[in-house]
Amino acid sequence: MLNEMSPYILLGFFIAGLMHAFVPQRTFARHLAGTGWRSVVKAAAIGIPLPLCSCGVLPTAIAMRRNGASRASSASFLIATPQTGIDSIAATWSLLGPAFAVIRPVAALVTAVFGGMAVGRSEGKTAAPSCCPLVEEERMEHKGFPDKLLDALRYGYIDLVGSIGGWLVAGLVIAALITVYVPTDFFAVMGSRPLLSMFAVLIVAVPMYVCATGSIPIALSLMLKGLSPGTALVLLMAGPAANFASFTLISREMGRRAAVIYLASIIIGAMGFGLAIDYLLPPDWFRIENVQAMAGKTFEFRLFSTVCSAVLTVLLVVTFIKGYRHNQTTVSAMTKEYTIKGMNCSHCLSTVAKSISSVKGVKQVAVNLSTGIASVEGEHNADDVVAAVRNAGFDVVL
């Protein structure tokens, strides 16, 4: 599985880095201030290729919201972005085939537009925008092409690997365990009842946290054990897009009604597209012959794929070591600790650390992802730190 995925994942990381370095984030927000269908469609179309997980997308969407994006477009962005990305599309193609790779972003687009329009209608015609202007206009750095290219490589192969690498490895390990230890006929009963299997997968997927790329090998292994392709799509959509942390933060920032619509649109969209795959589309589109061959006893390790797997493994090990050392770092002269709610990955950690560092008087920040505690050194105003963290899309407890 690793050899099949690694070339596509590395390519996806590179393209994601280019998008991050060469496309200013404010460009996105400028086009999402409207409340009509155009802004909702734009938000979904922008979010689909972005390689952000369901927790990493929250700060981005909330920053867009506070820069003037409507609730409708913000909800559309929140639904579409975690379901897929340029890296997960490539990895989906490599393991599950072109039909899944095409249907997955289409399903994300449709569910995001549906959910965004529903949120817009729930606001009512007289609803006023509740965006907050930024305290300071973010200064754009005028960098040359070589510097931007280095930023792209750093983001794609360091920051992004650190952000989704753990979930990718977890997905591969779970998939390997399912493939090896679950009997072939274990899901035979559910395989003949797609609707029942979809409800079962939703019960597990909605509270579970897994990134769009990490969900691919899990879906693949379940298909090899007898679950239908439509049920696999339900996992691919609901697993990355919905989790309790996202629901809580969306409730606080956009209201409980918007959060309920957000969750309902993901569930309805996932089941709708899953049933369409199982009952309306040709089964031949979803055969995974290349992967079924992998279930045999012999493996042919191609040089290019093996080299890509080795490179990806080195990147994962380096980022894991770096993250572990960062979490173990303590500063003896820290003056105050804050408990941050809503962090789930290194992308969240980086966003929180950067936001607190921008507060006047802060000399050093150490954020522990596992405990959620941010230790802040320097003479600073606690209210400013709280405001900075909340403006970044997270909650804080003193």
Image: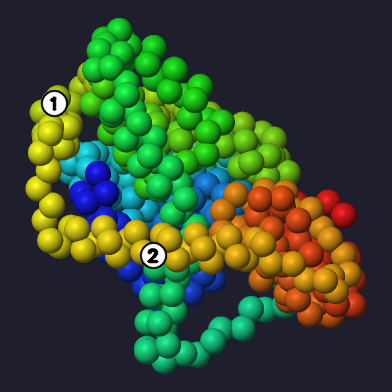
Residue 392 vs residue 279, the one in the foreground = 392
Q: What is the residue that sits farthest to the top in this orientation?
A: 189
Task: Residue type at mark 1: give it.
Answer: Pro
Residue 325 seen anywhere in this rendered image of the structure: yes
Where the N terminus falls, by quadrant?
A: top left
Q: Find residue 171 and name its label.
A: none
Distance of mark 2 from mark 1, alpha carbons?
A: 39 Å
Quarter of the view holding residue 15: bottom left
As drawn, 289 above or below 62: above
Task: Tell whether 190 sits left or right of 22.
Answer: left
CB atoms of marks 2 and 1 within 8 Å: no
Residue 269 vs residue 160, the one in the foreground = 160
The residue positioned 48% from the left and 30% from the top of the image is: 205
The x, y position of residue 175, in whole percent, is 34, 35
The x, y position of residue 271, in whole percent, is 39, 24
Q: In the structure shown, which secondary structural element does the residue marked by tag 1 occupy? A: loop
Task: Residue type at mark 2: give it.
Answer: Leu
Residue carrying label 2: 315
